[in-house]
Every structure is written in structure tokens, then in C-alpha cells.
Image (cartoon, coloured by chain):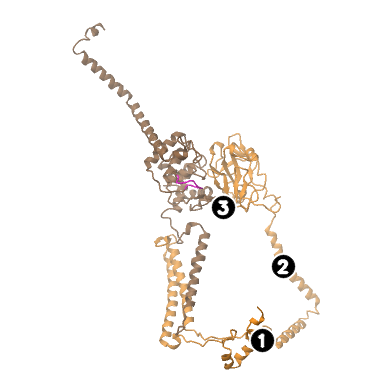
Chain colours: A brown, B orange
């Protein structure tokens, strides 16, 4: 040490110290770099939560409270999970336009990125169902027949046997499932929006939800054939009978009146 | 106001006179032309163009024949369509959308074939068949006295010739045979039975039977059932392949929902629940429709048939509609394996009321 100490004023000492310091810094950086990267991820997550909180304060806080605790105008969002947010905001139901028996579906004004940020914020308030991935809800290769059986047992009582929807009490209704994306169908079953009961994975496994989505897309999709012509709302004999009585019988009466109103005489009187 | 206001010629006696006068001669009609009840007789017959012009008649004949021919062609088209189109062929036709080619072509051709027969017949009757007005007077319904006398005489002859009054044995056995024959129909009514005995009061549920989730066919555990969810269960041991599955599930179908225990207002409901999980019959007590339109925020269950509404947070009390009884509740608990199980059958008959229900 004496030797080293004696050379501390050597002209090259500063260079050596600098080199050592650089090596130490580099080594430390190398050692901590992966940890650093992980930290960057949580930053992105916390950034999303932060952005989501800003959107929440503007769009949701007036009814659901500043911290998602709920008010007399809107339920608590603690524990509803990101899937509920993705469904409610993604289908345009939230933010609600006005109070009423039921909040209707309308045009969605948020981008998917904004919805994800909102969902991240609400999910941070308490654990709940997570937004499903495409693998979970894609109807590709699902069992349509099994889905039909499950749909008729669990869903058809409110949504009609082909998902045309139907009325409930006091102005509430089960909406039509026509044109609803597989993701939103999945999230609705998972979270039970508004007055719909939920069908959690514990009682209705993921695969069964996919089967149901495949069934709905088969019987009420864009290219679903209606072999008999007009579906007339797909409600069964009520609308079909009404159509037959009004238009079928009506046109027969019109023809009969037309025939009787035109005389066959040569000289019209 | 008095009878003075009624013009005398409109009184029945005067009217009859006017009627007779009208038939009597033309002069009376001219005198009484303001009589509103005079029989105007048939209007003068007016000919049609087809009655006057032979070429017009020919045109009408061709039109009728054309429609009948079109009907024949449409029938041939119907048969051709039946042969050509496979049953699952779907085509796009505006404005119907994606429609079965077979259904559409069969409907159009059969409709055309029938319509053309009708239209041809109507056109034929209107333009070519005689259209001269004919009056046909009513006649008495009663038969002529000679006809009546003949019938009575024939009947008396028949009775005498068959000797039915003299051969009493034949007469009495014949009456007996005729009286007995309807009994065979009465006996067949027995096939409407047997009486249901206690089948209306009992279901497959019994103490210790586990609640099987109808989606997964696995026993249901309390932790599987979250608040706000809806699950349908059937009693352990019942299989969908059983020949009596439909009969049994029609009585034993049960829906499971979970409420916050503090939301349950009915004391017995709370007692019969497990940790807020309640099990209710899915069969409406009005006329037995399956009822499971459950609103998870209000805890109301609505029947789709006649809108009976039950409050699941208050012992399934009827809050609206024609149902006469609350939905029967199934008493549940948890067995040693941690699965939900029934603690007995329903205490009251499920489904609609019946005469002996009490």
C-alpha cells in the first residue's frame, strides 16, 4: 500500500483512477441492466394507470366517485376488473348518457388504447375479471352444437333462442346479440353487465363460453341464412302470424276489392 | 211529436196497397214514384263488350287459356325445382337475403300455379260466362202432404214386415246391443290414467343428493358460485341420457344464485341458504313455464309466459303477475367433500297449483 500511496501524485494516477471508476460503473450497469428493464415495464403499466386515471376523472368520476368507490348515481368499480371496463366502454354503454331503467348500447367514443388505459386504472382499484385474449374468445374450432345446448339452457330465456333479445321488467331488456363482437360476448358472460347475471369460469368454463360464441355467430351472424325468407325478427310464430294476417290476408282482400270494383259491362255506369 | 208526423202512405196498410198497385200496373208506379218502399224490380240487363263483340270474346278466351297454361308451366317448374335444387342450397336474392333456393322456387312456382287457376276462373266468369240476372223465389221447407203420407206408410210397412213389434226377443236384444257398444269407448278412457298419486308432490331431490352443475356435469362447490351469477343444477344421479330425463328435470330443475346474506329479507330463506347461496325451483307456479329471467341487481325473476315476477331476496314472493305461490325453495348445505348438497326434497309441490294441492 505504501508503494501505491507513494505514487498517488504520479501524473498517470488520475488516468488509472478514471479507468477504474469507468470499469466499476460499467460492471454495475451490466449487473443491474435486466432489473432496469423490468422496472421500465412497470413504469409503462403505471403510466397506463396514470393516463387511465386522467380519463376516468373526466369521463367517469362524476357518477362512480373520484376513487371508483361509487356514488348514489353509479356503482362502485372496486373489483369489477378490466373485462367489465372493456365491455362497458367498448360497447359505448359507458359513459352513460342519462339515468334510466337500462343504459343502452351506443357509439363508442374512446380508442381501444384509451379503453385499455381506463381498464388498467379500474383494475388497479381491486382484482376482478381480466380482459380476455383472442385465444380465449375466438369461436374458431369451437363446438357449435354444444354451444347451442348451453345457450338454450343458460341464455335463451332472456336473449331468445337465436339471440334476438327480449323484454324484462320495468323497461329493462335483454339486448339483441346481433353484431356483438366475440370479445364483448365473452366479457358479458364473464362479468354480468347491468342486470345480466354472470357466468364465471367456475360454473361455465372458458371452452363452453367459446362454444356459445360460436353458436351465436352461427345462428345470428352477418351471413346467417334465413331459409324461409324474411326472418321477421326471428321471434317465431307471433311476428310470422302477424305478417300473414296483415300482409297475406290484406293482399287477398285488396285483390278481391279490385276485382269487384272493376265492372265488366260494356257501358260504364 | 205524434203519429200525425208519419206520412200516411208509409204506414203498413198503405204500403201494402202501394206494393199491390206497383204490380198491378204502370200507372200506379207513376203516381206513387215517391214511395220509398216500392219494389224497383231488376234493373235492365246491360251487355258486356264480350257479349257484343266476338273478337273481344276471343281475346278473353285467349287470356283465360293463357293463365291456365301459365299455371301448368308453373307446376312443371315446381317439379323441376324439386328435382334440381338440393335442400341445403342457399342463394342471395334481394330483398329476402340469404334464402334457401329450394324453398323460394317451390313457393314461387306453387303460388303462381294456384294464383293463375284462380285468376283464370275469375276472368272466365266475369267476361264469358252468362251474366244475366236471375231471381229465384223461396219455397216452403215443409214437404207436400202426399210425400209425407207416403213416407209414413212406407215406415209402417217396414215395421210390419220386419215383425219388430211381434218378435220382442229380437227387439230387446238389439236395443241391448246398441246400448252396450258405446261402453268400449268409455273403457278406453281408462288409458288417460293412472292417477298421478304423489308424483306431483315429489321430485328427485332428496337429502344428501349433490347439486350437479348442468353445464359441466360436476358437483357444484360454494366457492364456484359468485355473487350475481346464475347456475342451473340437477340432482345427482340424473343423466341426460336417461329415458325419463325430461319428466324428472321438468320437476327437479333448480336455479342457483348467490346474494349477499344481508340482502336476504326472508328469515326462512336465509336459514335454507348456504352462505348467501339460494336454490329455487325453476318451474313457474302459475302454469309451469321454465322461469329463469334473473335480474342480478334487483334479484327479480321474471316468467316469460305471463310476466309473473318473483323476488328471490324475499322468499321468492310473487310481486307481479298471475302466479299464486312463491317459487319453492330447496334447502341446501355442504357435504363432507365440500360440495353443495340438498338437505331434502322441496317442502311443497313444484309448479302450478292443482285441485288437491291444498
Q: Secondary structure at mark 2?
A: helix
Tags 1 and 2 in contact by the CB under 8 Å rule? no
Q: How many marks?
A: 3
Q: Quadrant of the N terminus of chain B?
A: bottom right
> What percent of the width, then of the height, locates residue A82?
44, 38
Pair 3/1: label in front: 1
Q: Is residue A179 left or right of residue B19?
A: left
State which tag comes first along the sequence, 1 or 2: 1
Instruction: Give the mark nearer the N terminus: 3 vs 2.
Output: 2
Q: Which residue is mark 2?
A: B182
| Circle 1 SS class | helix
Q: Which of the two discs, 3 and 1, labels the residue nearer the N terminus?
A: 1
Q: Check chain identity for marks 3 and 2: say if they share one.
A: yes
Mark 1 surroundings within 10 Å by alpha-carbon count, few (fewer than 14), some (14 through 19), many (20 or more): few
Q: Residue furthest left?
A: A11
Q: Which residue is mark 3?
A: B304
Amino acid at each position: 500500500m505504501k508503494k501505491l500511496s507513494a505514487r498517488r501524485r504520479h501524473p498517470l494516477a488520475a488516468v488509472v483512477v478514471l479507468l477504474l471508476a469507468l470499469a466499476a460503473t460499467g460492471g454495475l450497469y451490466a449487473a443491474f441492466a435486466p432489473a432496469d428493464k423490468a422496472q421500465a415495464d412497470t413504469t409503462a403499466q403505471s403510466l397506463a394507470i396514470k393516463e387511465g386515471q386522467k380519463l376516468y376523472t373526466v369521463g367517469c368520476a362524476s357518477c362512480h366517485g373520484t376513487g371508483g368507490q361509487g356514488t348514489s348515481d353509479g356503482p362502485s368499480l372496486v373489483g369489477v376488473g378490466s373485462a367489465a371496463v372493456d365491455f362497458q366502454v367498448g360497447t359505448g354503454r359507458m359513459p352513460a348518457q342519462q339515468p334510466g331503467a337500462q343504459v343502452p348500447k351506443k357509439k363508442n367514443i374512446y380508442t381501444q388504447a384509451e379503453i385499455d388505459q381506463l381498464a388498467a386504472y379500474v383494475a388497479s382499484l381491486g382484482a376482478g375479471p381480466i380482459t380476455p385474449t383472442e385465444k380465449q374468445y375466438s369461436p374458431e374450432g369451437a363446438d357449435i352444437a354444444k354451444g347451442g345446448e348451453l345457450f338454450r339452457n343458460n341464455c335463451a330465456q332472456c336473449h331468445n333462442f337465436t339471440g334476438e333479445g327480449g323484454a324484462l321488467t320495468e323497461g329493462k331488456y335483454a339486448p339483441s346479440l346481433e353484431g356483438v363482437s366475440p370479445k364483448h360476448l365473452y366479457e358479458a358472460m364473464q362479468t354480468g353487465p347491468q342486470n345480466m347475471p354472470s357466468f364465471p369460469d367456475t360454473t361455465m368454463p372458458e371452452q363452453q363460453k367459446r362454444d356459445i360464441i360460436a353458436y351465436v355467430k352461427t345462428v345470428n351472424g352477418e351471413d346467417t341464412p334465413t331459409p324461409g325468407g324474411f326472418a321477421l325478427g326471428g321471434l317465431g310464430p307471433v311476428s310470422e302470424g302477424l305478417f300473414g294476417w296483415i300482409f297475406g290476408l290484406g293482399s287477398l282482400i285488396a285483390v278481391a276489392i279490385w276485382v269487384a270494383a272493376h265492372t265488366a259491362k260494356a257501358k260504364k255506369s | 211529436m205524434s203519429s200525425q208526423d208519419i206520412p200516411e202512405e208509409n204506414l203498413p196498410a198503405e204500403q201494402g196497397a202501394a206494393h199491390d198497385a206497383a204490380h198491378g200496373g204502370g200507372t200506379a208506379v207513376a203516381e206513387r214514384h215517391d214511395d220509398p218502399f216500392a219494389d224497383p224490380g231488376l234493373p235492365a240487363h246491360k251487355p258486356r263488350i264480350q257479349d257484343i263483340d266476338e273478337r273481344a270474346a276471343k281475346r278473353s278466351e285467349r287470356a283465360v287459356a293463357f293463365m291456365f297454361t301459365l299455371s301448368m308451366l308453373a307446376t312443371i317448374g315446381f317439379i323441376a325445382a324439386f328435382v334440381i335444387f338440393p335442400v341445403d342450397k342457399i342463394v342471395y336474392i334481394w330483398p329476402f337475403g340469404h334464402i334457401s333456393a329450394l324453398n323460394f322456387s317451390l313457393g314461387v312456382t306453387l303460388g303462381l300455379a294456384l294464383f293463375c287457376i284462380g285468376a283464370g276462373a275469375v276472368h272466365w266468369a266475369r267476361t264469358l260466362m252468362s251474366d244475366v240476372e236471375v231471381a229465384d223465389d223461396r219455397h216452403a221447407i215443409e214437404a207436400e202432404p202426399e210425400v209425407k203420407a207416403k213416407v209414413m206408410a212406407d215406415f209402417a210397412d217396414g215395421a210390419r214386415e220386419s215383425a219388430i213389434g211381434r218378435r220382442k226377443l229380437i227387439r230387446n236384444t238389439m236395443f241391448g246391443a246398441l246400448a252396450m257398444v258405446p261402453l268400449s269407448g268409455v273403457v278406453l278412457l281408462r288409458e288417460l290414467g293412472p292417477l298421478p298419486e304423489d308424483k306431483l308432490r315429489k321430485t328427485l331431490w332428496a337429502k344428501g343428493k349433490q347439486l350437479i352443475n348442468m353445464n359441466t356435469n360436476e358437483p357444484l362447490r360454494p366457492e364456484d358460485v359468485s355473487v350475481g351469477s346464475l347456475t342451473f343444477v340437477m340432482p345427482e344421479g340424473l343423466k341426460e341420457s336417461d329415458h325419463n330425463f325430461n319428466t324428472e328435470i321438468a320437476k327437479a330443475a333448480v336455479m342457483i344464485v348467490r346474494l349477499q346474506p344481508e340482502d336476504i329479507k326472508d328469515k326462512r330463506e336465509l336459514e335454507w341458504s348456504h352462505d348467501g347461496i339460494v336454490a329455487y325451483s325453476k318451474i313457474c307456479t302459475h302454469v309451469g313455464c321454465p322461469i329463469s329471467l334473473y335480474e342480478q341487481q334487483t334479484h327479480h325473476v321474471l316468467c316469460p309466459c305471463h310476466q309473473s315476477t318473483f323476488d328471490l331476496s324475499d322468499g321468492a314472493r310473487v310481486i307481479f303477475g298471475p302466479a299464486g305461490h312463491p317459487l319453492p325453495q330447496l334447502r341446501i348445505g355442504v357435504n363432507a367433500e365440500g360440495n353443495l348438497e340438498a338437505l331434502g326434497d322441496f317442502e311443497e309441490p313444484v309448479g302450478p297449483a292443482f285441485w288437491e294441492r291444498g
